[in-house]
Image: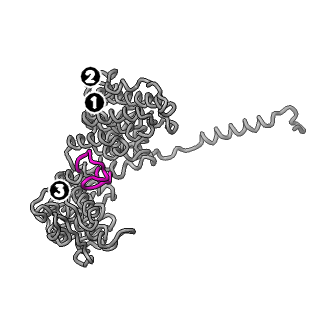
Amino acid sequence: MTGPGLTGVDLPGALLDAAAVHTVRRRAGLRPGPAARPLDLAPDDPRRPLPAGARRRLDQLLAGRAAPSPAAGRRGAAPDLAELLPQWLALANERGYKAPPAALPALLDAARARTDLRPQALRLAGPRGLWLAGLNPEWRFALRGTGAAGRLPSPGDAEGVRLLWDEGLFAERVALLAAVRAEDAAAGLALLASTWPTERAEDRLMFLDSLRAGLSDADEEFLEAALADRSRNVRATAAELLSALPASAFADRMAGRAATCVGLDRTAEAPTISVEAPHECDAAMQGDGLVPTPPAGRGERSWWLGQLVEAAPLSCWPARFGGRTPEEIVALPVADDWQGELHAAWCRAAVRQRDASWSRALLGAPAIPPATGPGTSSLAERAQLLATLPADERARWVAAFVAAHGLSEAFQLLGVCAVPWAEPLGAAVIDALDIARDAGSYPWSFSGVMGLAERCLAPEAARQLESLTALPDEEEDTAPGAGGYWSEAFQRLVSTLRLRAAMHAELTGTGTDTGTGTGTGSGS
């Protein structure tokens, strides 16, 4: 473009030059605005720092958490770092370490992505993690619930406790009640009672549920009053808690009702249990928390019977059945096809009342096929019954179950066993995996058990597993390529156990030969 007096002038360049000069002039003339308020300093964390090896391991685990998941089916021979992070966090917290400042963002991201990591991750992050979470909206979850628990007043700080209870967020109040209850059960109950009438129904339910920890006869009066609550769910929870107090008046009332429904048939040739289910759910029964309307597919009378027997103290039955033991009572035949309903209610009662003797009776011998056992064929109910037994007895029972029935039905039962698995249980699982491999199936048919084994076997088991990592000869009747997949799966299992041993050594300062999988390994 040209014109008079503009020949040879670079108009676009001149325009940009003029704009640049104007911009500099405008910026130079700006008056400074008020300075932003300086950030509060990050609080001090007096806990000890991680050892150098453990610090590097945390970085590796957090990076592995964000790695892409392997394709479905084949996982390869490398350990799954994301599944080792929960164990690492638990052990680091147990040893009283704090997270390195540089690791806090990745640690908070991990906690945001996985709610199961939050309690341990936020505990390791400590006060500096909460301070940092307040600066990023994506991490605000840390300021609620479990994260807020890190800022709770001491249970002995009466003024601080009262202030937070009256003005705190709901999650903060739940955490506060749990903390006070753990320190002083009576003080926790008094705190809850002080505002109980003004709480919302859904909040009352959550608060009432927190009384499970430290439940005792001292809570009976409060729970009896809660039986008259206007919320059906609150009434049902109060009844459940009262039934876990065998000496309570509620338990006595339930025992009397249950005794009118279940007893010995005096007319039978052999000792037999007779059942006469309730014909109505009267006002008094409803006042004690029984739900009158059954769920779809359940008969009314069987529904009422189950609730009565479940709530009755198990201590009432030996006298009702002529001094018989729980094993002898469970072994008695039950007339008119009531056995399933009666035994299921006894199972729920044993779990609720944490009664190991009744749990043993209802579990029966582990070698008995589940469908013909004395108490229940439900694996979910068996797992709940097992949880009431001491850890070593639980491990022995599940080991015998695995040896008798294999792994296909054992997953739920393995999940309630203490970690690391005791020797008889670990050996039984390894033997069962070896048998499954020899049977010619693919390892992903047992992927759930393999995943548990990686997290729960004692690291010392790596030595026993080494011989299984070799590629076996492929038989004609085996699935194509199954041997190679099994070899890969066992290699991953051995590598994971060795890595867990190394993690434990780095956090505890104990020497371990991770090349052979030996070392202490406990707790990891």
Badge 3 amino acid: Ala
Extreme residue in the front direction: 269
- Nearer to the camera, 205 or 391: 391
Task: Measure the C-alpha gap from mark 3 to mark 1.
Answer: 36 Å
Reading the image, the residue beneath label 1 is: 521
Q: Point out residue 485 in the picture as x, y percentages from the top left corner.
A: 47, 31
| Residue marked by disc 3 | 185
Q: Which image quarter holds the N terminus? A: top right
Residue 182 in picture, x, y percent from top left: 20, 52
The residue sitting at 31% across, 53% down in the picture is: 371
* Residue 79 drawn in magenta: no
Q: Secondary structure at mark 3?
A: helix
What is the C-alpha distance between the residues marked 1 and 2? Answer: 11 Å
**Residue occupying image coordinates x 81% and y 33%:** 10
Q: Is residue 351 among what the camera can see? A: yes
Q: Main secondary structure of the magenta part?
A: loop
Start-end of magenta stretch: 364-382
- Given residues 414 and 373, the one toward you in this image is 373
What amino acid is labelled 1 in the image? Answer: Gly
